[in-house]
Amino acid sequence: MKEAGRVVAGSARGTRLEAPGPATRPLADRVKETLFAILEPGLRGARVLDLYAGSGAAGIEALSRGASGATFVERDKAALAVIERNLARTKLGGPAVLIVRGSVASFLDRTPPLPAQRFDVVVLDPPYDDPAELLTTLGRLGRSDGHLRPGGRLVAKHFWRDAPPARIGLLASERVRRFGETALTFYRIEEDG
């Protein structure tokens, strides 16, 4: 079994997570620690969307730290089974957790959510070999009728050389953190005005 690191903090702290396979790039513990140190103040009770979920490590870490719910979107059948096993291993499954099989594009292009169904935090980790996928997804999430609530936060994990723009739609970059070849770009969605 390939590992996707461990849950860093919260109710499932220390639990080792399974990775879907050799083609995935698990969220390294060091990256996860920085990511969630920045998100932590607004995480308790938040609704989290984990796009290109892979092992589900981002959404599981958020649940462990007090998020009220998480939706995992992944198209790979084997990865979906890993997410289910990781949720069972951490005992973080439940009615507020949803696993969606399908492409991120099809999920985001469905009928726009009602305001109460929007997410507080979105984490996306698209394939590094397709930088256009990152830009397209950010464009979908930066719409006023999108899946992120006004004032919500979005974190994009990407290859450091493929940095996304500082503004895209209603998304405005707040900060960037780099870890070798990996970078995290943090956005906040602004009010449509």
Image: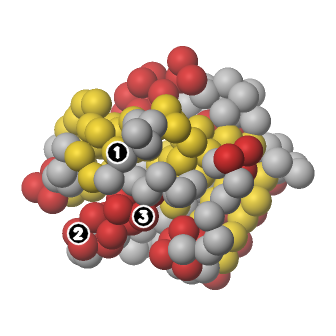
For marks 1 and 3, the one nearer the N-term is 3
Quarter the N terminus occupies: bottom right
39 lies left or right of 102? left
Q: Which residue is mark 1?
A: 171
In percent of width and height, residue 168 lies at 27, 52
In percent of width and height, residue 153 lies at 46, 37
CA–CA distance between discs 1 and 2? Answer: 18 Å
Vertical side of 124 occupied by 119: above or below: above
> For residue 48, what is the image quadrant?
top right
Toward the viewer: 152 or 129?
152
Give the mark toward the camera: 1 or 2.
1
> For residue 174, what is the image quadrant?
top left
Q: Which residue is mark 3?
A: 140
Residue at x 52%, y 38% (from the top left corner): 150
137 lies left or right of 53? left
> For residue 190, what is the image quadrant?
top left
Numbered mark located on residue 131 in the image: 2
* Crowd tier of the residue under label 2, counting other residues whose Cα lies within 10 Å: few below 14, some 14–19, many 20 or above: some
Residue at x 66%, y 33% (from the top left corner): 46
- SS for dot 3: helix
- SS for dot 2: helix
In percent of width and height, residue 21 lies at 49, 72
Residue at x 76%, y 59% (from the top left corner): 98
Note whether residue 59 is visible. no
Point out the residue furthest to the right here: 95
For marks 3 and 2, the one nearer the N-term is 2
For marks 1 and 2, the one nearer the N-term is 2
Residue at x 40%, y 53% (from the top left corner): 142
Vertical side of 67 occupied by 16: above or below: below
